[in-house]
Each structure stands twice: as structure tokens, then as C-alpha cells.
Image: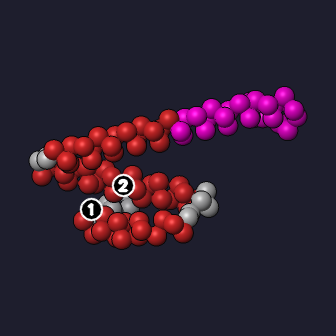
Amino acid sequence: MALSNDSGDSAAKARQVAQQCRVVRLLCASVSEAHKGYAEMLGMGCSPASLESMGRRSARAMEALAELIKSMQAEDEDDEWMVPVFAEARRLFPPAPEG
């Protein structure tokens, strides 16, 4: 059933959006925690295959999160330091061709 614009449905929609925000927060925390673990693994040393895998996964995560931030119009000029990191990630771990 589609939600209409009456106050009861607006309250239901607000509850749904609040749950969605909770899911986004938890997903971001999970991604953050996984990447913290990757950084710790790199500090201890890892195989070339693991390094490649972590590099590709983190490069894809960076791209996805950057697109999300851009779509939210939440870009920040203080993030300029990330530009060379993105450029190097794209060079070392090029995105898979679309299609």
C-alpha cells in the first residue's frame, strides 16, 4: 500500500526514514570497522594477494562513498587532500569496465 499525505501516513513514513538512517549509520560503521582491520593487517604485513584484494575493495568503497556524499551535496573543501589519494587508487586499482 502506498503512503498518502495524511498525518498518520506521514508518521509511518518518518518512522521508516528513521530506520533507514539507522541502517545507513550501522552499515557505515561496519565498513569503517572493516577498513580499520585492513589497516591493522597492513601494519603487520600481508600477502601480495591480500594487499591486492584490500586495495580493490577499499578503492571501490571510496568511489561509492564519494558518489553518495556528492549526491547528498555534502562535499567539503577541506577534503581536497583526498584528491591525490583517489587518483592513485584509480591508477593502482582501476575500476572494472561498466556493462
Between 60 and 40, the one nearer to me in the picture: 40
Q: Residue at x 33, y 57 (%)?
A: 59
How many discs appear?
2
The residue at which mark 1 appears reads as 93
Residue depicted at 53% across the width and 39% down the height? 25
Mark 1 touching mark 2, by CB under 8 A?
yes
Label 2 secondary element: helix
Q: Residue at x 50, y 35 (%)?
A: 26
Please provide percent x and percent y for residue 22. Answer: 58, 34
Residue 11 lies in quadrant:
top right
Q: Any mark on residue 60, and which?
A: 2
Mark 1 and mark 2: span between their CA atoms?
Answer: 9 Å
**Horizontal and vertical percent for residue 10?**
81, 35
Residue 40 to residue 48: above or below: above
Q: Amino acid at mark 2?
A: Arg
Q: Residues within 10 Å of mark 2 (few under 14, many from 20)?
A: some
Nearest to N terminus: mark 1 or mark 2: 2
Residue 90 in sight from this viewpoint: no
Tell me the element at label 1. Answer: loop
Q: Quadrant of the N terminus?
A: top right
Please name the residue shown 20% across and 53% down the image. Answer: 52
Residue 72: x and y in percent read 61, 57
Q: In the image, what residue type sits under mark 1?
A: Phe
Q: Which residues are magenta?
A: 1-25
- Chief secondary structure of the magenta portion: helix
Image-quadrant location for residue 6: top right
Q: Is residue 9 left or right of residue 95?
A: right
- Quadrant of the rendering where the C terminus is positioned: bottom left
Residue 47 among magenta residues: no
State whether residue 78 appears in this view. yes
